[in-house]
Image: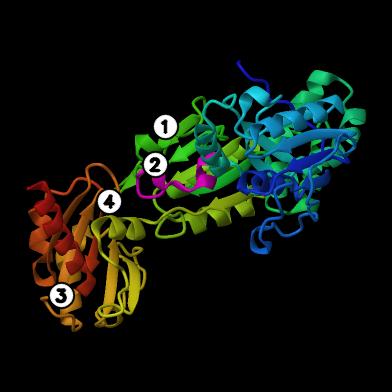
Amino acid sequence: MRVFLASVPLEAARVVIVGAGEPALAKLRLFLNTPADLAWFAPDGEPATLETPQGAPAPAARTPHAQDFAGARLVFIALQDVAEAARLAGLARAGGAQVNVVDQPGLSDFQTPALIDRDEVVVGVATGGSAPILARDVRTRIEGVLPAGLANVARMARELRETVKASVPDFMARRRFWERAFRGPAADLAAEGRTAEARREMLRLLNVAAPEQGVVHIVGAGPGDPELLTLKALRVLQDADVIIHDRLVPEAVLERARRDARRLYVGKARGDHSVPQDQIEALMIEEARAGHRVVRLKGGDPFVFGRGGEELEAVRAAGVAVFVVPGVTAALACAASAGVPLTHRDHAQAVTFVTAQAKPGGVDADWTRLAAPNHTLAIYMGVDRAEETAARLIAAGRAGSTPVAIVENGSRPNERVLTGRLDGLGALVRGASLTGPALLFVGETAAFSAAQLDVRADFAA
């Protein structure tokens, strides 16, 4: 470790900023929403009104004197005159302050890390001043996986800290308590702003005789590209004890999960349900009741032809805490990757997601409505019934010349796009030897995919 990041309390701490250019304003913005006693000096003249951050103290348009640094905890100096900056740094140190001279590591007692501010939780990334842009980029990556409600969790922990200390005097037992609290439903509830429920759950955990309460997260894994996971899905995956996953979830997504999480495969294909749906639901409930953080990981979005609604209903009925994390559904991802705009001012004023695999004994699709012009159809699970689907759409009035596109393994490295006409859809599917998950698109906008394939061919040539 070449640098040490210290946590400096800011309650009533005097912080002095010297300068009026953008480097000084950047430091000023860091402290505007803190409890620090902020003082600002602008010896080179005040910045333009439009540049001055809202809520900033009025700058003193003069050079600070020694007494201005008296009692200061932190001093930031951002002046072009390096000699003057060094002189002021000496005055500040004499007053007991730690000093940062912007872009002058040799004159500084510390460097400002790239900060992630979640109010009660602050994360810093430092490179010792050698690579501030790298620190900023690392900060951006970390910031993406931290929930916005993290401050609520920390605030609740602060409010209950003394209660927990009195109730659990043993240090190691207290540590285990906080681990359960921060990895269970209490933290999830607090992060969502459900403070009263979070507090009740936290206090319930204080009863050492109470069994740990598990939780289920029904998570959309997206279409297969791990970079299309939502930030929340990634965070939940990395916190899971048990992952119950579908056939459509690729290994590239599972690799983003916690390494020591148990993985239970319950994949289903047409005519091959390795684990029936009711057993999947029972498994989710059983694992949660054992005190585990369960992630039910489903391809695409769990609420778009994913039976997520049934699973949510079953888990709720069992009295288990359950949360839903949406995913990028296959229709959106495959269309975007293939260049098929689902709606278009000139060609499609509506889009319908429809499954070709209706529930046995269920109501058949309204083919007349689905065959409407200026309308894009995104057909899930349609490969096996492509010829029948095309015939019904044509019989309901859709022109046989309507463009179609098939997107196999959409968003993945082995993605394949085929284009044709509605009256040749069956033949197109038969000749494609499809082995991966595929979506069918029917409508005028499907022709955009063919144009994109031509452009790709031109680039390849």
Q: Are marks 1 and 2 in contact (CB under 8 Å)?
A: yes
Q: How many discs appear?
A: 4
Instruction: Write the residue at 69% across / 44% down.
Output: 118
* Rendering coords of residue 187 (x, y %): 70, 42
Q: Which residue is mark 2?
A: 226
Relative side of 57 to 397, left or right: right
Q: Secondary structure at mark 1?
A: loop
Instruction: Write the residue at 23% across / 71% down.
Output: 445
* Rendering coords of residue 126 (x, y %): 60, 28
Q: Which residue is mark 3?
A: 402
Q: Residues within 10 Å of mark 4 (few under 14, many from 20)?
A: many
Amino acid tagged 2 = Pro
Using the rendered image of the protein, determine whether residue 183 is visible from the camera's viewpoint.
no
Q: How is the image coloured?
A: rainbow
Q: Which residue is mark 1?
A: 255
Q: Is residue 152 magenta?
A: no
